[in-house]
Image (tube, rainbow, N blue to C red):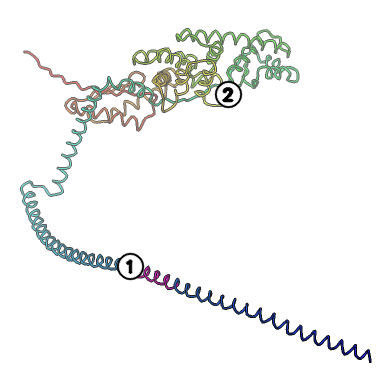
Amino acid sequence: MDILVIVLTALLAVGLGGVTGFFGKSIVSGRNTGRARDEATRILDEAEEQKKQILVNAKEEALANRNAIESDLRERRSDLQRMERRVANREENAERRLEDIDKTEKDLQIKEEELEGKLSEVKEIKEKEETVLEQISGLSANDARGVVLDAAEKEMEYEIARRYRDRDQQAKEDADHKARKILTLSINRLASEVVSENTVKFIPLPNDDMKGRLIGREGRNIRAIEAATGVDLIIDDTPEAVSVSCFDPIRREVARRAISKLVTDGRIHPARIEDVVEKAKEELDEEIRSDGEQAVLDAGVMGLNPELIKLLGRLKYRYSYGENILTHSVEVAHLSGMIAAEVGGVSIPVAKAGGLLHDIGKALTHEVEGTHAEIGADVARRYGITPEVERAIMEHHDEERGSMEAFIVASADAISAARPGSRKDTLEHYVQRLQALEEVAQSFPGVEKCFAIQAGREVRIMVKPDEIDDISSSKLARDIVKKIEDNLVYPGLVKVTVIRETRSIEYAR
């Protein structure tokens, strides 16, 4: 029973607790629902306000865009209207121009028809006049044309000859202003470097037995000679002579002297060969120095470095086309000094030094690469030569030169090389050249006599005075010069002198 009461009591307590909890929860839930409803109402009100504001902003923006678009459309319409007006104006102008062109074409067509009519009239008049002229002159149109052309040609020849003479007179009047350049350029014509050098020397022997002694046992003597001198000793079938071959003239001369001494002495063996070669070198060095000093004294050039003087002496054993280079250098120095003195306004010592040293590079062409002008300028710079002299050495074979001294040295070089007898020339070739000059001069009409003089450097021509007048003489001289230049090969310059002489002879009775 107690247990039942207790159970009932517990169940009642649980039921009361559940009812109490339910009603408590309902009260709390009702309070929360009210607050949520108020919050929702507030949010809806705010959303409605924002919606209204957004709608207002959207209407304002749409209105602004519409206004902008309408303004843009108005501007475009205005532009289109302006373009339409311009196009209309251009069309009107084009129509007016077309009308003007049509009118001009009609006028031109009328004028062309009138011109054709006038040309026909002129042609008829010309034909009538030609017929009348042919009847009067007794010549056809072609014959008359030939006569007129011949007369015009003769008149033109005479006029050209007269103008040539006038130009010559004008050139003579201006000679004082142009003398320096004329002198240097005219003398320098056809100046060219031609080197032909003999690289073999023959040494006479007393007998052919000496060839065996020079060869030696198993060739030891000839090997010793070649090793000591640097040459090729050629022993062939030439009677009582041997040949020494070498591109270097100094070594070739040393070998020639040494072999000559060995042949004269008769004692030929390797040790003796070395001694004789050394002595020959010493003697040749002394002679080279002495020859260089003598050349410097002859040329009148002072203050040169001793090594440069020694190089200058080596040129005694160099030849260019049969002409000795040392003699040629001294001659060029003299010519350069004389030309500089005559021209004036240039340094005579520089010209003489440049003339003496212009070929100094040829002393080293077998040892150093490059042209002799470049080698010579480098050597001159190394031994303290002034820049002006160095420039003359460098430029004496150039087409363009930067100083008057260089022009003078080049001119003197050309004069020395072209001087008759300076270089080898056979008698037959010399005579043929003179005959060719006289034949060229004699081939022109009106020439009575002609003479090639001064070793072919001048041709004097006597003309017939009744066929050649003074003006035609100038033209004849130029024609002969042109034919010589076109048909002949000659060194230096050829002067053509035309002489016209009129003689009147009467006898008193």
- Determine whether the residue tagged by mark 2 lies in a helix, strand or loop: loop
- What is the span of residues highlighted in magenta in the rendered image? 58-76
When asked about the image quadrant of residue 92, the answer is bottom left
Q: Residue at x 29, y 67 (%)?
A: 78
Residue 487 percent location from the top left of the image: 35, 32
Work out how far the residue at label 2 is from the one at label 1, CA to CA, in angstroms: 87 Å
Q: Residue at x 9, y 53 (%)?
A: 126
Residue 107 percent location from the top left of the image: 13, 62
For disc 1, the neighbor class at 10 Å (few under 14, some 14 to 19, many from 20) is: few
When asked about the image quadrant of residue 61, the answer is bottom left
Residue 251 appears left or right of 168: right
Q: Residue at x 20, y 25 (%)?
A: 464
When asked about the image quadrant of residue 62, the answer is bottom left
Q: Which residue is mark 1?
A: 76
Residue 202 percent location from the top left of the image: 59, 17
- Determine whether the residue tagged by mark 1 lies in a helix, strand or loop: helix
Q: Which residue is mark 2?
A: 368
Give 350 or 334, whichever is nearer the viewer. 350
The verdict on residue 270 being magenta is no
The three-letter amino acid code for the residue at tag 1 is: Arg
Give 159 or 435, whichever is nearer the viewer. 159
Residue 505 appears left or right of 161: left
Residue 239 percent location from the top left of the image: 62, 18
Name the dominant secondary structure of the magenta segment. Answer: helix
Q: Residue at x 93, y 89 (%)?
A: 3
Figure quadrant of the C terminus: top left
The verdict on residue 62 being magenta is yes
The three-letter amino acid code for the residue at tag 2 is: Val
N-terminal-most mark, 2 or 1: 1
The mark total stands at 2
